[in-house]
Image (spheres, rainbow, N blue to C red):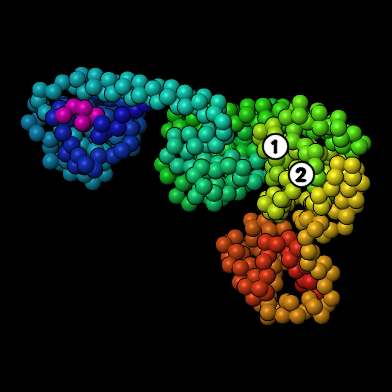
Amino acid sequence: MAIPTLAVLVGKLGGGMVPVYPARGDLPNAPITGVHVSELPDPTPFVDAGELLLTTGLTLGASPGECEVYVERLTRAGVAALGFGIGPVHGSIPPALIEACTATGPALLEVPEPMPFQEISRAYWHEVGRADQRALAEALTVQGQLVRAAASDQPRDSLLRNLARGVGGWAAHHGPDDTIRAVWPESARERAEEARLGARRVMSGRHSAAALHVAEDAVMVQSVPSGARSAGLLSAGSTSPFTAAQRTLFSTTSVLLGLLAVRARTGRERGRARSEVLARLVEAGETPAALRMAAEWGFRLNRGPMRVLAVTGAPPEDVLELVERALGDETPAGRLIGHATEAGAWFLLPDLEIEEGLAELSTAVRSAEGEYRALAGRPVEAARLPQAIQGLLHDATQLPAGTVRAADATPAPILPARTDAEAWLAPVRGHPELIDALAQYLRHRGRWEAAAQALGLHRNSLRHRINRAARLLEADLEDPDVGARLWLSLRSLGLA
């Protein structure tokens, strides 16, 4: 039930109920839970907290002591407001009653003659009905928006945008690996990350939820159920408390995100099965058959030279998830052809220009758990793909953990001599706090939150130290080859 506030009710009645204390502009914003009429000297056994109590003061004495006792009783019972009817008993509100209400509450209103109390009660329930109708209309509108969002070309982004607008704040979807998959608006990314960290401390179980505060935001966080699995977390924040309609919008969005994940997983599993068939054909040297089937299934496979990407260092399912997220596409033509085993995984890259894709993969590797190593080979003809695949899988295992590079790129020195390490690290050797920051940043593969927690710092403090160290070293720590060399240099000097 939607409940009107005292200010709404006063406005509805016009001059039928006039604020005495506080003034009209300062009336409390709390909802009125009901309207009760009583002439008892102690009506508290019959009233509920949040109600508007109406009385003519039939049994109320006008002395300060009597008024104080009466008002104290109402305050203890949680009465929100007292409406005093003028005419039958009192020609005006007793000054002692005004003084008592001003001192301790509740709000005091004058009901001038001849406004009947029944009219006030009818006005209240009329407003309750109107508010319920508005809430129902809003709920129906929101449900229609959700249906349209779920059926759009980009359903997840549309659902989050709709949710953020519905709560008057922001919304985010966190994947099962806790990375933020999408957030709206983008400027709320840091608040969404803080909400996830706060929720993880109080949530337990796959189908749990949490309500908390992050800075000035009220935040809701809930697991996104997706069949027998979890599709991550949904979070939303607003500077205002959530209404019942907004909580319904949040829950419905969570369910729809879970259904989208089930649908995507079903399509992805079918796509993976077909991808593996094509990969096995290529691996066996049956490229003409693979080309025919790729065209039929909507996979992209070149007749000319292609690159092979080899990835090792994690379980097959994790490798597939990471590479598909970094390099794949939701459209059929963007599906990757590849095959994953315990020894490693390989994928065909139809685009020979791979710098942007490797940068995306490098970012994904830095934020993921696992000792990933990725190596993209030089372009080769279809007939040489089987040999190229085996060679790259072997070479990838020799790379330092966290490395993502192309075979035709010039690698940074991997095993620096001690003298080289000392010379390179000289600018930061006198700053132990920078050495510790570098060691933890590299140990956690660039994951700011994990590294900051290990150091007992706020991540902004860690960012400041890492940026300062990078300037002193004149090094680009975003470059995985530079990061690998720096890590080995720190290890060679016993600093990590």
Where does the C terminus fall, quadrant-wise?
A: bottom right
Please give left or right for residue 394 compared with residue 241 in the image: right
The circle on residue 121 is: none
Name the residue nearer the viewer: 219 or 313.
313
Secondary structure under tag 2 reads: strand
Task: State the extent of the magenta-drawn residues as a range.
Answer: 9-14
Describe the element under mark 1 as helix, strand or loop.
Answer: helix
Query: Which quadrant holds residue 436?
Result: bottom right
Residue 492 drawn at (x, y percent): 82, 72
At horizontal 92% and vertical 36% (from top left) the residue drawn is 284
Point out residue 156 in the picture as x, y percentages from the top left corner.
57, 34
Q: Does residue 49 show up magenta in the picture?
A: no
Where is mark 1, residue-wise? 334
Q: Which mark is residue 349?
A: 2
Tell me if mark 2 has few (under 14), some (14-19) or many (20+) residues whose alpha carbon lies within 10 angstroms of its own: many
Between 108 and 266, the residue placed more toward the observer is 266
**Residue 476 in view of the camera:** yes
Callout 2 amino acid: Leu
Vertical order, 490 against 390 (above or below): below
User: In which quadrant of the rendered view does residue 83 lie?
Assistant: top left
